[in-house]
């Protein structure tokens, strides 16, 4: 685990000391947008028109942020238009890598574009003097050889609409009329749950841990309530808000309960959240994006300050293909 400083790799864990034991996530630095005609998006530069084969997605199958982009890529019919490279699950002193020990997973890891050894080489290829964290996902532009975006929240919005002319896929997970609702749910879910589990897990003081723990489980109770009255987070249609929550929920019982000490309750203990996560898992195209081997291996094996011997637990037994009651309750 480390980061780039003036283009040089430095091996160092998150600095929580200067923040009173709290984990504070840094902002993504590449914020351009792919648009249908290459016009500039909400941030960054223009020049990134939506064409087939031009863009490439770098992901970790373990990472909940990268996972969102894989789901939208699948659901929006983009797999033949946007290639993908997958890093190995282990993230040790050189950060994400393109090879590592054989794991019990069908996933093929490797850098499909450049055959690089370390993932940070992609960042210095885009910007030789880059300083900052080296995160997945990245949406790479093969034409200008740069990073379009390393912010998953933006990438899923691009995937939702920018390529529609190319794919003919009209599914809209961010409909105009529901945007205000989706955005406000997203804010709360990001703070309390998506980033919330990291704030709990990476806290290095008891006080910081307890504060984030309280916020996390309050937010889960609020979501459980909300999902008792409506099928999805923003009403009767699946939206980006659901996919953003899903990738944290699917990891929760296997990783966050134990490894991050988020153990007030499991998702399995919430009737609505657990049925909801099974329903989303069963949406065609989604199950193939879920790799629990990479997920468990990454967290337990990579975070040695939390789990010094890197032992990966064998449980829990989970079946996301089991029936759910969402259609019965809201059909
Ligand atoms: N804001 C980014 C966050 C991405 C992120 O933090 N990814 C993690 C993996 S789960 C990562 O690559 N961490 C490496 C690091 O922080 O050094 C996004 O949503 O795209």
Image (spheres, grey):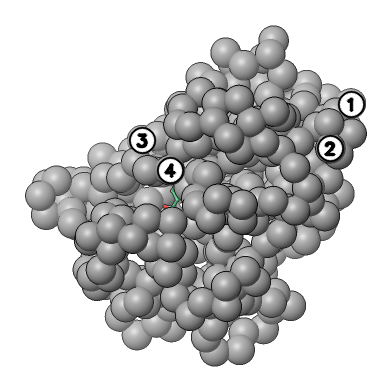
Task: Return the disc, 4 or 2, that comes first in the chain's sequence.
Answer: 4
Q: Nearer the viewer, residue 92 or 211?
A: 92
Ligand 1 under 8 Å from disc 2 Cβ: no
Circles 1 and 2, Cβ within 8 Å, touching? The answer is no
Q: How many marks?
A: 4
- On the image, which quarter does residue 39 sit in? top right
Q: Residue at x 64, y 31 (%)?
A: 38
Q: Position of residue 157 (x, y in %)?
A: 63, 32
Q: Secondary structure at mark 2?
A: helix
Q: Could you tell me if the residues under marks 4 and 2 are in contact, i.e. CB atoms within 8 Å?
A: no
Q: Residues within 10 Å of mark 3 (few under 14, many from 20)?
A: some
Q: Which residue is mark 4?
A: 30
Q: CA distance from mark 1 to mark 4?
A: 41 Å
- Is label 4's Cβ within 8 Å of ligand 1? no
Asked whether residue 289 is in view, the answer is yes
Q: Which mark is residue 331?
A: 1
Residue that appears at 78% across and 21% down: 236
Q: Report the front residue among 210 and 248.
A: 248
Identify the mark nearer the N-term, 3 or 4.
4
Q: Circle 2 is placed at which residue position? A: 166
The residue at the point 69 percent across, 77 percent down is: 108
SS class, disc 4: loop
Q: Earlier in the sequence, mark 1 or mark 4?
A: 4
1 or 3: tag closer to the N-terminus: 3
Residue 60 pos. (x, y %): 56, 64
Residue 138, percent from left and from top: 53, 53
Distance from disc 3 to disc 4, alpha carbons, whole Å, reads 29 Å
Mark 3 vs ligand 1: CB below 8 Å: no
Does mark 1 have its CB less than 8 Å from ligand 1? no
Label 3 close to label 2 by CB (< 8 Å): no
């Amino acid at each position: 685990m480390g980061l780039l400083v003036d283009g040089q790799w430095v091996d160092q864990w998150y600095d929580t000391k200067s923040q009173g034991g709290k984990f504070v996530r840094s902002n993504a630095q590449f914020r351009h947008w792919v648009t249908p005609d290459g016009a500039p998006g909400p941030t960054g530069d223009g020049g990134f028109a939506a064409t087939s084969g031009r863009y490439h997605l770098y992901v970790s199958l373990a990472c909940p942020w990268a996972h969102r982009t894989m789901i939208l890529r699948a659901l929006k019919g983009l797999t033949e238009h946007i290639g993908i490279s997958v890093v190995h699950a282990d993230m040790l002193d050189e950060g994400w890598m393109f090879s590592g020990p054989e794991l019990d997973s069908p996933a093929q890891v490797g850098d499909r574009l450049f055959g690089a050894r370390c993932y940070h080489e992609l960042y210095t290829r885009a910007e030789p003097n880059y300083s900052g964290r080296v995160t997945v996902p990245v949406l790479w532009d093969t034409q200008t050889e740069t990073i379009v975006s390393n912010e998953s929240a933006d990438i899923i919005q691009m995937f939702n609409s920018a390529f529609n002319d190319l794919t003919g896929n009209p599914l809209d997970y961010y409909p105009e009329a529901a945007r205000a609702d989706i955005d406000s749910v997203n804010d709360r879910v990001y703070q309390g749950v998506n980033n919330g589990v990291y704030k709990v897990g990476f806290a290095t003081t008891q006080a910081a841990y307890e504060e984030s723990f309280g916020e996390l489980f309050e937010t889960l109770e609020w979501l459980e309530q909300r999902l008792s009255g409506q099928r999805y987070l923003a009403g009767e249609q699946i939206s980006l808000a659901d996919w953003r929550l899903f990738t944290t929920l699917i990891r929760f019982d296997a990783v966050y309960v134990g490894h991050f000490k988020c153990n007030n309750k499991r998702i399995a203990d919430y009737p609505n959240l657990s049925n909801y996560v099974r329903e989303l898992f069963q949406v065609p195209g989604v199950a193939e994006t879920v790799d629990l081997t990479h997920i468990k291996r990454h967290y337990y094996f990579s975070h040695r300050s939390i789990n010094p011997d890197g032992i990966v637990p064998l449980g829990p037994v989970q079946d996301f293909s089991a029936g759910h009651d969402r259609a019965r309750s809201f059909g």
